[in-house]
Amino acid sequence: MNQYRLAGRGPSLITRVLTAIAGMLVLVGLFLAGLVAWVLLAGVVFIGSVALAIALWRQRRRMEKFRRRQGDGVIEVEYEVVAERRERD
């Protein structure tokens, strides 16, 4: 395999050290940004789940209160037969 090198000297030791430090700072910065994003997302999911739980709890309480007002589900009514229906022959 042919390799081509540019004319001149390679990077100096100081350039390589500064490049390595800059790369590490970028990686640390990206890690911290990801960590902050994860914490924010976890917070949004937590708050959303709490809000949903409260909404479902309130809805269940309303339904139970409605059932208690209705009794055992039996509705008592009075009716009167107006006309009897005759079967056709």
Image (spheres, rainbow, N blue to C red):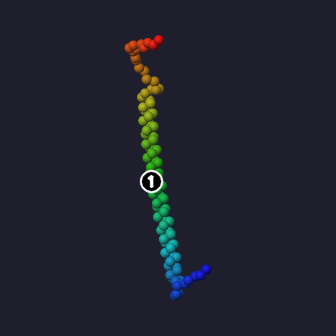
Q: Which residue is outermost to the right?
A: 1
Please determine whether, in this image, residue 38 is positioned above or below residue 18: above
Q: How many marks?
A: 1
Q: Which residue is outermost to the left?
A: 82
Q: Residue at (46%, 44%) from the top-left corner?
A: 53
x, y percent for residue 86? 44, 12
x, y percent for residue 69? 42, 28
Q: Which residue is outermost to the front?
A: 89
Q: Residue at (45%, 57%) from the top-left corner?
A: 40
Q: Which residue is outermost to the bottom?
A: 8
Please determine whether, in this image, residue 2 is positioned above or below residue 84: below
Please determine whether, in this image, residue 33 is positioned above or below residue 19: above
Q: Residue at (43%, 33%) from the top-left corner?
A: 65
Q: Which residue is the site of mark 1?
A: 44
Q: Residue at (47%, 11%) from the top-left corner?
A: 89
In this rendered view, identify the residue nearer to me: 80 or 31: 80
Q: Dot 1, how many residues are within 10 Å of its Cα: few (below 14), some (14-19), or many (20+)? A: few
x, y percent for residue 70? 43, 27
User: Which quarter of the image is occupied by the N terminus?
Assistant: bottom right
- Kindly identify the amino acid type of the residue bearing the numbered disc 1: Val
Q: Secondary structure at mark 1?
A: helix
x, y percent for residue 71? 45, 26
